[in-house]
Amino acid sequence: MPRIANIISTAHYLPAHKITNAELNERFTALGKPDVIGKFAESTGITQRFYAPDDWSTSDLAVPAALEALKRAGRRPADVDLIILGTDSPDYITPATSVVVQHKIGAKNAGTFDVGCACASFPTALTIASGIIATNPGIRTILVIGAYMMHRLADPGDPTIFFYGDGAGAAVIEAKEKPGFIGSAMQADGEYAESWGIFAGGTKEPASEQSIRDGRTKVRLVKRYPPEINDVGWPKLFNRLLAENNLTAEEVDQVIFTQVRKPTIELAAKNCGVPIEKCHMIMDKWGYTGSACIPMALDDAISLGKVKSGDLVVMIGSGVGYNQAACAFRMS
C-alpha cells in the first residue's frame, strides 16, 4: 500500500510582547531617522510584531507550537520518530536547534535535524518529511517545525529590525493511502548569498572583536534584492509545480506565500492566476516571522476556516541566499 505523507495537525505560537510601528518610529526618530518606519510600513503592510522574553531562544518558541500540534493530532512526544526544524536564527551554530527541542519536549524516541534555507525552510522540510514517510515504513510520525527569532540577532539601531517578529509554527506528518503530499519544486541562486545575512561567526569569518565592532555578527542587508526574485520566481515555481503534477490554478484553494510584503503577494497572486482571497496573509498583524511565517499562516488559515479538509494548498517560501521552495498538499 502507498505511504503518502499527510498533514495531520498544525499549530503556531506567538509570544506576548507586542511591538507596534509607533514604538519603532519613536526609536528611529530619536536616532535621526524619522521617516524610515513609515516607508517600510507603507511598502509591506506590517503594523506590528511580537517579541519573546529576553531570556528565550528560538527553541523556546518552537516548543509550545510543537506540543500544541502533537496535542491536536492526539500524539505524545514519545510517539515522534523524527523532528525536522527549519530556522535561520538557531540557538547555536552547532548543535542543531532540533535536538534542543527534542530534549525540551521529551521526544525521547525521535531523531532530529535542522533545515537552514531561511524562509524556504518549511516547504523544504515538508518535502523532505514526505519523502522519508514514503520510503521508510519504520517512520510513522514526523514533527516539522519552523521557528524564528531574528530580532535577537539584529542591531536595534538598524531600520531593517522593522521586519523581524518572533514566532513558530508546527505540523504533524503521518502516512495515509491518499494525498496528502502531491509534489514540490525548488530553485536557488547563490549569486545573492552575500546580499543579506550574518557574515561573521562561521568558518569564513570567525567571530572576533573587530567583527563585533563592525556589526558583522548581526544580521545585515548589504545589497538590495531585486523585487523580480519573488515577483517572477514565485509564479515560476507555482506554474512548474502545477504542470509537473497535472494541476491547474483553478484547482488551488489556498496559496501561502512568504509573509514579508503584501504588494508582492498581490502581484504574485495575479501572475499565478489565483484570486487574492485565496492567499491568506498574516504579516499585517504578526510581522515578518521568517522561517515560521508559512506554518503560522497555514495554521491561522485553518483556524479561520479558509483551509478545510480536502482543500489543495500550495506553500511557497523564499529566503536569503537565495533559496525558494514550493510544495502542494491535499489537506486531510
Image (tube, grey):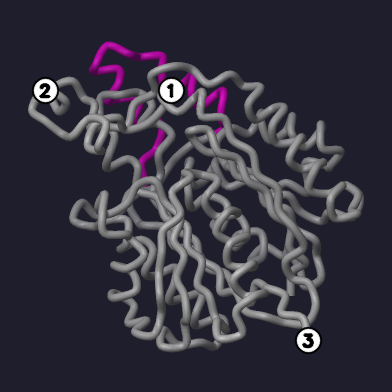
Q: Is residue 22 visible?
A: no
> Badge 1 is on which residue?
195
Q: Residues within 10 Å of mark 3 (few under 14, many from 20)?
A: few
Q: Are marks 1 and 3 in contact (CB under 8 Å)?
A: no
Disc 2 is placed on an element classified as helix
Q: Nearer the viewer, residue 297 or 212?
A: 212
Q: Residues within 10 Å of mark 1 (few under 14, many from 20)?
A: some
Query: Upstream in the sequence, badge 1 or badge 2?
Result: 1
Q: Nearer the viewer, mark 1 or mark 3?
A: 3
- The kind of residue on which mark 3 rests is Met
Residue 87, given in percent of the width and then of the height, sits at 42, 51
- The kind of residue on which mark 1 rests is Ser
State the CA–CA distance, disc 3 to disc 2: 59 Å
> Badge 2 is on which residue?
210
Q: Is the residue 205 above or below the residue 319 in the image?
A: above
Q: Quadrant of the N terminus?
A: bottom right
Disc 3 is placed on an element classified as loop
- Left or right: residue 264 versus residue 290 is right
State the CA–CA distance, disc 1 to disc 3: 47 Å
Q: Nearer the viewer, mark 3 or mark 2?
A: 3
Label ID, residue 1? 3
Q: Which residues are magenta?
A: 18-45
